[in-house]
C-alpha cells in the first residue's frame, strides 16, 4: 500500500490542463531551446529525448500514455537505454503524490549521474514537486495529451504556480514540504 502524502481534488483538474510553458512537436527544436540539466516526465517525452540524443538527468515513466499502454517501440527505447546510472522502481497511485515518489525524485536530482524512476501507478503529477526542488535554470519536459511536449523553465514564477497548486491539494501538505525540503 502506497504512503499517499497528497491527492488531487477534482476542482484542480481543469487548472492542470493549462501548460506550464510552450508546447513543442519537434524534438530538435525543443532540445535547442532547453537548458541543462533536463528532466523528462512521461514515457513518450523520455522516448523522444533519448531518440534525440539527450539523456535526462531525471526521467519518470509509468509504461502508459493517455491511459493506455505505450507502444512496444517506446517501451523498447526506454528499457534498452543504457544511459541511466540508476533505475529505481517506485509506487505512486493515480491522482496522488506518494512519499516514495517524492523521496525518489529528490534523491534522483541530488545524486551524480542520471536516474530513471519507473513508476508503478502514475507519474502525471510529478512535474509539480519536481519544479520545486530542481535547480534554477533546469528544463523540465512533460507531455500535453494530444498536443505535444511542454518545456518548462525552472524559475520562480513556475515554482510559485506549482507551490500554489500543491498547497490546495488534499492531504498533508506540511509533510509534502518536509519531504521535498522546501518552505511552505
Image (spheres, rainbow, N blue to C red):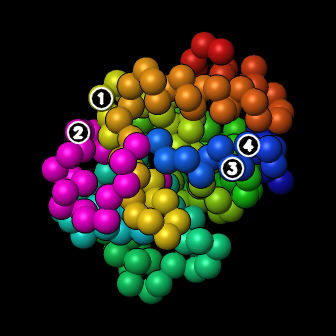
Q: Residue 35 carries which label?
A: 2
Q: Distance between the residues labelled 4 and 3?
A: 6 Å
Question: Of tags 3 and 1, which is closer to the observer?
Answer: 3
> Where is residue 68 drawn, in percent x and y?
61, 79
> Where is residue 12 drawn, in percent x and y?
73, 43
Q: Distance between the residues labelled 3 and 1?
A: 27 Å
Q: Residue 137 carries which label?
A: 1
Q: Which mark is residue 17?
A: none
The residue beneath circle 4 is 12
| 7 versus 166 height, above or below | below
Q: Which stretch is magenta?
A: 21-42
Toward the viewer: 27 or 51? 27
> Where is residue 13 drawn, in percent x and y?
71, 49
> First in sequence: mark 2 or mark 3?
3
Q: Do the residues labelled 2 and 1 touch (CB within 8 Å)?
A: yes
Mark 4 Cα within 10 Å, few/some/many (few <14, many 20+)? few
Residue at the spot x=34%, y=75% of the render? 77
Q: How far apart are marks 1 and 4 (CA)?
A: 27 Å
Q: Are marks 4 and 3 in contact (CB under 8 Å)?
A: yes
Kindly state the secondary structure of the residue where label 4 is placed.
Answer: helix
Q: Which mark is residue 14?
A: 3
> First in sequence: mark 2 or mark 1?
2
Q: How far apart are marks 2 and 1 (CA)?
A: 7 Å
Amino acid at each position: 500500500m502506497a504512503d499517499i502524502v497528497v491527492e488531487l481534488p477534482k476542482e484542480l483538474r481543469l487548472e492542470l490542463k493549462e501548460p506550464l510553458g510552450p508546447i513543442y512537436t519537434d524534438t530538435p527544436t525543443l532540445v535547442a531551446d532547453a537548458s541543462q540539466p533536463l528532466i523528462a516526465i512521461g514515457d513518450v517525452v523520455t522516448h523522444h529525448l533519448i531518440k534525440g540524443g539527450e539523456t535526462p538527468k531525471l526521467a519518470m515513466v509509468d509504461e502508459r500514455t493517455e491511459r493506455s499502454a505505450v507502444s512496444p517501440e517506446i517501451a523498447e527505447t526506454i528499457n534498452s537505454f543504457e544511459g541511466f546510472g540508476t533505475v529505481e522502481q517506485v509506487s505512486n497511485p493515480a491522482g496522488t503524490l506518494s512519499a516514495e515518489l517524492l523521496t525518489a525524485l529528490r534523491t534522483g536530482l541530488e545524486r551524480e549521474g542520471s536516474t530513471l524512476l519507473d513508476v508503478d501507478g502514475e507519474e502525471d503529477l510529478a512535474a509539480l514537486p519536481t519544479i520545486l526542488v530542481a535547480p534554477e535554470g533546469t528544463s523540465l519536459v512533460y507531455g500535453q495529451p494530444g498536443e505535444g511536449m511542454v518545456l518548462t523553465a525552472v524559475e520562480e514564477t513556475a515554482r510559485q504556480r506549482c507551490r500554489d497548486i500543491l498547497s490546495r491539494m488534499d492531504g498533508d501538505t506540511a509533510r509534502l514540504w518536509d519531504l521535498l525540503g522546501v518552505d511552505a
